[in-house]
Image (cartoon, helix red, strand yellow):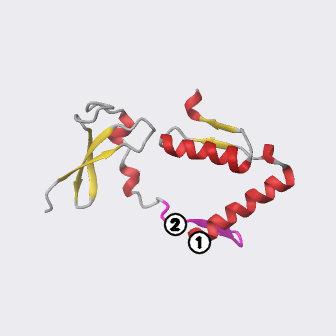
Amino acid sequence: MEATKHVKTVCGYCGTGCGLVLEVNNNRITKIRGDKDAPVNNGQTCVKGAFAYEYVHANERLKYPLLRKAGKLVQATWEEAYDFIAEKLTHIKTTYGTDAISLFACARSTNESNYVTQKFMRAVIGSNHIDGCNRT
C-alpha cells in the first residue's frame, strides 16, 4: 500500500484562491482540508472546496473534445474543435452582428479565466453581453 501523500494546492472551485491540502492515495484524492498556512483562508474552506472532488476521478468526465457528425458525438482533435468554434462564431457575428453573441461566465472559474473571458467578448467579439451567476 502506497503511503498517503499530502499535496498543497490552490482550490479551483471559484476565484477566491483558497489554499488546500490534498490527501492522495494510489494517485486518487481521498480527502481535502484547508491549508492553515494559506493567507487567503487560514485553513478554512467552504463545503465545495472540501468535498467536491469526486468529479476529478469520474468516468463520465470529458477528456477530449467532441463534435457532432452525422448526428453522433465523435472524438475530435483540439484543432478541429477550435476551428469549428471559430467558424460558427464568425458566421454568427457576420450574419447577425455582435449583439447576437453573449457569454455566461462562471463563478467557479478563476479570476484570471473570467478576465480573459470578458476580454475576449469585448475585444474579439465586440460585445458587452456577458453575464454570470456571481451577480445574484
Is there any visible trace of residue 74 in the rendered image? no
Q: What range of the chain is rendered magenta?
A: 62-76
Q: Earlier in the sequence, mark 1 or mark 2?
A: 2
Dividing the picture into quadrants, the one containing residue 106 is top right
* Residue highlighted by disc 2: 64
Q: Nearer the viewer, residue 60 or 43?
A: 43
Q: Is residue 32 above or below residue 36?
A: below
Residue 17, position as x, y percentages in the image: 38, 38
- Tag shown at residue 76: 1
**Residue drawn at 56 percent across, 42 percent down:** 115
Residue 6, position as x, y percentages in the image: 20, 50
Is there any visible trace of residue 132 in the rendered image? yes
Q: Residue furthest front?
A: 123
Q: Is residue 36 above or below residue 122?
A: above
Residue 28, position as x, y percentages in the image: 28, 57
**Residue drawn at 63 percent across, 70 percent down:** 80
Locate residue 18 relative to residue 83 in the image: left or right. Answer: left
Dividing the picture into quadrants, the one containing residue 104 is top right
Magenta residue check for 67:
yes
Mark 2: few/some/many CA within 10 Å (<14, 14-19, 20+): few
Q: Quadrant of the C terminus?
A: top right
Proximity of marks 1 and 2: CB atoms separated by less than 8 Å = yes
Label 2, secondary structure: give it. loop
Q: Tag 1: residue type? A: Ala
Locate residue 122 relative to residue 55 in the image: left or right. Answer: right
Locate residue 124 relative to residue 116 in the image: left or right. Answer: right
Mark 1: few/some/many CA within 10 Å (<14, 14-19, 20+): few
Q: Is residue 122 above or below residue 85?
A: above
Locate residue 62 relative to residue 86 in the image: left or right. Answer: left
Q: Tag 2: residue type? A: Tyr
